[in-house]
């Protein structure tokens, strides 16, 4: 599904990614862990096409399609979804309206029929329930005045509605209490399937108790320095990152 | 600009007009360029106006001669040569069919979704060539007439209802109010008149019919709207279709009068030609709009979406005379390229328990300059007055400007006045967020901008709001990278 080869990227003359190699097969969940500032969000942004990054080497394909040459919206339409570490507020824009516009833009790009307001509302309400979100959230402006937890849930709601091929979760666990974390993890797990993959970026092992990954990668200094199974996350929890990076860094 | 002759008294002038005759050939279709008392007499004569109106025009003209162009607004333009303007000309024939209309204009109609039947009319094609306007007009007129609503051109009102004109004309915006209002008072050629009798709720938005007339509005337009006791009317002015005009200067005056318990909703969409990318050729829109809440518990609500014109100078205001009266101002002003807008409102609280709300949304793109200028004045007798003001500016790019100039004068300490202001840049991160969800950059910008303007659009009549949203996206096309 997703193949990353030798990916290098920089921001404002600062080299951040130094050659990332990563292959995610359909249905797999991969976790990216690493100390603060190691480039996890940068990787998520580069994959989704956020402006401001310069690709200095490597390639990325999604189902054989060259991702890096596509505009952000075309990547989204091709099935890349990024759950933001810091979801953005859009004042005055109704949450339902926004999500409907997004879904219809994606459907349209695939030659599918657009959903009308009534069908859409039915769809979104069904997706709302398992996330234990209040229907009133739909009437509010996108992320405006949402609590940290509500914002993260809203990201998962969007993902559930847009049904991407690849879901990239950037620190979705940060700022969540344990109950909310479980709800969010359940939401993600419900979306797991043989044709959908996930790249779960996290700083803490905690999330991976609930979203159990197939593989865990450690990112440091813009490179994947270690890959292992889910037990690697536990090891990191215990020992920190220092033993891998040669520095005294605690997770 | 100085008068060539001594100023005789008004009575003398008006009684002597025939004796002196006209320098201008009164049979001519157009007056020669320039402005003097003869030209004003020519206009008045052409329009077969009653004496009082000619006198009023001449008073305005003489006042205007002593006045100076206002220079406090944050706009710049070369001096206007008022002697180079033709102040009266008979309506010219427009294009004969849509085939003769500028394809650019037709393209914009398409984008805005202007109904087919209206396109020709808006493009200035002689209406009867396209569809039976007379029947549309008369159907409306008949219905309104049955309810006692008067809705006609200003000229028609001068002949049919001179007593109303004499009573109300200049009663809200006096002829000597300001430079442009005085000029308008002296030389206006037409406009609209509306009177809603006691207790009548006007059953329709006064829009479609008006839009049919809109194509013919002149350079110096005059509107007078009176809502008698407990009457209600929603009035729509202008349209989203781009309006080109060979006259660069537009100086309109709008006066609203709301008597006891009456309510007037006045909505404007202004989309005059803004000029090209370098600002060449755009309209100067210098408008005086004011409403008087004359009776107790009356209400006047201004809603405007200003996207056109090279320069906009406009402050729709409310004089809250009656106790418990309410004034509202909801505004979206967009500047792109070289456009300049200095717009806002004045809320003058005179009566007890008067309330005003101001919501201003300024959007600046390109090299546009956008100024909100607003006055809230609470007079000593205005016990327990309330005002809430909110001014938000949105910047697109870094070559444009947004300025907020609030004036607050409180002369009664029971007043409650609240002011909030914000300036934000349209966020790269907002745009990316939308794109990451599958929306194109252009759709993202539209979504964000429309969200920003929501509180104002909500105040517009439904179909107008939809058009206004589209208009906004057309106006801002290509303004983000
Ligand atoms: N726009 C930027 N300009 C300059 N440096 C940046 C920018 N974005 C990220 N960085 C730097 O890149 C490094 C990696 O950041 P990031 O990918 O956010 O790390 P992580 O998500 O792993 O904490 C950090 O040192 C950060 O300061
Ligand atoms: Mg991060």
Image (spheres, coloured by chain):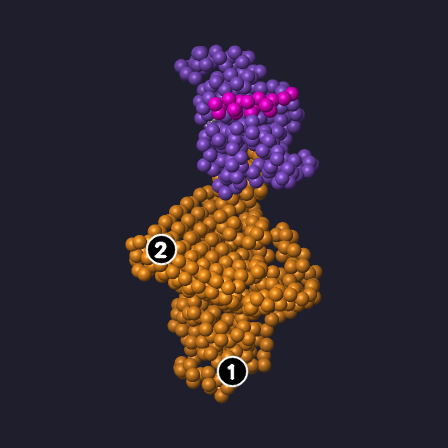
Q: Which residue was labeled with disc 2?
A: B385
Q: Closest to the observer: B324 or B448?
A: B324
Residue plotted at (49% across, 35% down): A143
Asked whether B328 falls inside the magenta stretch, the response is: no
Q: How far apart are labels 2 and 1 at the CA level?
A: 54 Å
**Residue A118: where, in percent of width, then height?**
63, 39
Q: Secondary structure at mark 2?
A: loop
Q: Residue at x 55, y 54 (%)?
A: B461
- Among all residues in the image, which is located at the extreme front? B199
Tag 1, which chain?
B
- Residue B23 - label: 1
Image: A107 above or below B271 = above
- Please determine whether, in this image, residue A162 is positioned above or below residue B413: above
User: Of helix, strand and loop, which one carries label 1?
Assistant: loop
In the rendered image, residue B443, in percent from the top left (x then y), is placed at 58, 42
User: Which hue belongs to chain A?
Assistant: purple
Q: Is residue A182 magenta?
A: yes
Residue closer to the observer: B22 or B327: B327
**Residue range (magenta):** A179-194
Q: Where, by quadrant of the figure, is residue A124 drawn?
A: top right
**Going by the image, does B319 lie left or right of B410?**
right
């Amino acid at each position: 599904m997703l193949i990353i080869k030798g990916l290098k990227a920089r921001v404002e003359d600062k080299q951040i990614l130094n050659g990332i190699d990563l292959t995610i097969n359909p249905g797999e969940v991969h976790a990216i862990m690493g100390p603060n500032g190691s480039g996890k969000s940068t990787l998520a942004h580069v994959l989704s096409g956020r402006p401001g990054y310069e690709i200095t080497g490597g390639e990325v394909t999604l189902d054989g399609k060259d991702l890096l040459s596509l505009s952000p919206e075309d990547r989204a339409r091709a099935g890349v979804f990024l759950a933001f570490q810091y979801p953005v507020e859009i004042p005055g824009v109704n949450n339902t309206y926004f999500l409907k516009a997004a879904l219809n833009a994606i459907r349209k790009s695939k030659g599918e029929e657009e959903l009308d307001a009534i069908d859409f509302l039915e769809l979104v309400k069904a997706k709302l329930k398992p996330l234990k979100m209040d229907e009133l959230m739909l009437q509010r402006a996108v992320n405006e005045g949402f609590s940290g937890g509500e914002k993260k849930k809203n990201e998962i709601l969007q993902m559930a509605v847009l049904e991407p091929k690849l879901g990239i979760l950037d620190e979705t666990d940060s700022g969540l209490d344990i109950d909310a974390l479980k709800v969010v993890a359940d939401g993600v797990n419900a979306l797991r399937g043989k044709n959908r993959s996930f790249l779960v970026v996290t700083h803490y092992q905690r999330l991976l108790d609930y979203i159990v990954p197939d593989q865990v990668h450690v990112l440091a200094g813009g490179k994947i320095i270690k890959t292992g199974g889910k037990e690697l996350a536990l090891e990191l929890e215990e020992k920190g990152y220092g033993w891998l990076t040669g520095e005294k860094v605690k997770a | 600009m100085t008068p060539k002759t001594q100023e005789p008294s008004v009575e003398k002038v008006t009684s002597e007009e025939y004796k002196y005759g006209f320098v201008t050939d009164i049979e001519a279709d157009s007056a020669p360029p320039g402005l003097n008392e003869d030209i004003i007499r020519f206009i008045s004569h052409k329009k077969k106006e009653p004496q009082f109106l000619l006198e009023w025009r001449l008073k305005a003209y003489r006042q205007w001669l002593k006045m100076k162009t206002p220079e406090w607004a944050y706009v710049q333009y070369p001096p206007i040569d008022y002697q180079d303007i033709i102040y009266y000309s008979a309506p010219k024939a427009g294009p004969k069919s849509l085939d003769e209309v500028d394809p650019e204009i037709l393209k914009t109609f398409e984008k805005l979704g202007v109904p087919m039947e209206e396109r020709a009319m808006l493009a200035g094609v002689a209406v009867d060539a396209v569809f039976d306007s007379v029947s549309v007009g008369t159907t409306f007129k008949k219905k309104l007439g049955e309810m006692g609503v008067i809705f006609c051109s200003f000229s028609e009102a001068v002949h049919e209802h001179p007593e109303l004109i004499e009573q109300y004309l200049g009663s809200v915006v006096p002829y000597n109010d300001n430079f442009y209002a005085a000029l308008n008072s002296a030389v206006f050629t037409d406009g609209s008149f509306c009177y809603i009798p006691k207790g009548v709720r006007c059953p329709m938005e006064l829009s479609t019919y008006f839009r049919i007339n809109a194509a013919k509005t002149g350079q110096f337009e005059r509107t007078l709207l009176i809502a008698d006791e407990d009457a209600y009317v929603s009035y729509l002015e202008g349209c989203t279709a781009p309006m080109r005009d060979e006259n660069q200067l537009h100086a309109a005056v709008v006066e609203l009068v709301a008597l006891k318990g009456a309510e007037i909703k006045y909505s404007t969409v202004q989309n005059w030609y803004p000029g090209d990318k370098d600002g060449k050729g755009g309209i100067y829109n210098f408008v005086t709009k004011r409403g008087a809440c004359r009776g107790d518990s009356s209400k006047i609500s201004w809603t405007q979406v200003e996207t056109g014109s090279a320069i906009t100078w406009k402050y729709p205001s409310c004089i809250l005379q009656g106790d418990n009266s309410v004034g509202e101002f909801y505004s979206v002003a967009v500047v792109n390229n070289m456009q300049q807008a200095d717009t806002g409102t004045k809320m003058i609280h005179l009566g007890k328990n008067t309330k005003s709300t101001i919501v201003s949304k300024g959007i600046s793109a390109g090299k546009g300059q956008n100024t909100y200028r607003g006055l809230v004045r609470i007079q000593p007798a205005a016990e327990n007055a309330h005002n809430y003001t909110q001014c938000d500016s949105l910047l697109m790019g870094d070559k444009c400007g947004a300025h907020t100039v609030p004036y607050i004068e409180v002369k009664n300490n029971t007043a409650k006045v609240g002011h909030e202001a914000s300036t934000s840049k349209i966020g790269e991160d907002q745009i990316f967020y939308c794109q990451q969800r599958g929306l194109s950059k252009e759709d993202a910008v539209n979504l964000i901008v429309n969200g920003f303007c929501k509180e104002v659009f909500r105040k517009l009549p439904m179909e107008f709001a939809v058009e206004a949203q589209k208009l906004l996206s057309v106006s801002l096309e290509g303004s983000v990278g």
